[in-house]
Amino acid sequence: MKLSLTRITISLSLLAALMMFPAMAHAQCTRCCGAQGFVTSLTVTPTSAEEGQPDSITIGVSSCYYTAKVFTATVKIIPTASACESFAQEFSVSGTVFPGEHRIFTYTLPAPKCDSTYDVTMNGTVRATLTVE
């Protein structure tokens, strides 16, 4: 009888642990969660600069692929003031990112020499702004 009670206790304990596993796994899922692709971020430092002052654009890329993939992005710095249209800038970022890896690409450029707020886009989506005074 004692052996049967022990087996029942162990079986119930295992069942309870298995039922909680999906909740624990879900709580730990912070980036990919089974989806494939890249998780990206873009920051501009400083966000307010004087004309010609060095300004850094940092792009963080995490891979949610199961094999190495090439990450490619086009970054554009677009003025909101029409008088500054000729000061728009553009550059491309490309690099291989391995499964589970996080890479950081940093580019330092002089701030445009025209006072305006600039939208900083990556692959067509506004990700940050830069104000040149």
Image: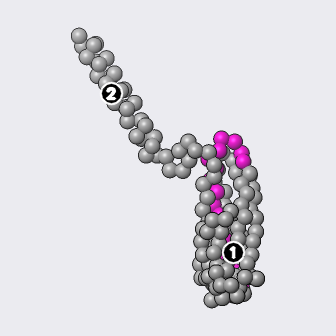
Task: Name the secondary structure under disc 2.
Answer: helix
Nearer to the camera, 34 or 98: 34
Taking 71 as reference, is 9 above or below it?
above
3D distance between C-alphas at marks 2 and 1: 58 Å
Q: How is the image coloured?
A: one colour
Point out which mark residue 22 bears.
none
Provide residue 68's location: percent of width, then percent of height: 71, 45
- Which of the two marks, 2 or 1, is nearer to us in this view? 1
Q: Which residues are magenta?
A: 51-69
- Quadrant into which the N terminus falls: top left
Quadrant of residue 21 within the rendered picture: top left
Kind of residue indicated by mark 2: Ser
Taking 123 as reference, is 46 above or below it?
below
Kind of residue indicated by mark 1: Ile
Q: Hey, which residue is sitting farthest top in the picture?
A: 1
Q: Earlier in the sequence, mark 2 or mark 1?
A: 2
Provide residue 22's location: percent of width, then percent of height: 43, 37
The residue singled out by tag 1 in the image is 77
- Quadrant into which the C terminus falls: bottom right
Q: Inspect the magenta stretch and tell me whether residue 94 lies in it.
A: no
Quadrant of residue 91 within the rendered picture: bottom right
Residue at 68 percent across and 62 percent down: it is: 123
Residue at 76 percent across and 82 percent down: it is: 86
Can residue 46 be seen here? The reply is no
Provide residue 20's location: percent of width, then percent of height: 37, 36
Q: Could you tell whether 7 is left or right of 50 in the image?
A: left
Q: Inspect the magenta stretch and tell me whether residue 63 lies in it.
A: yes
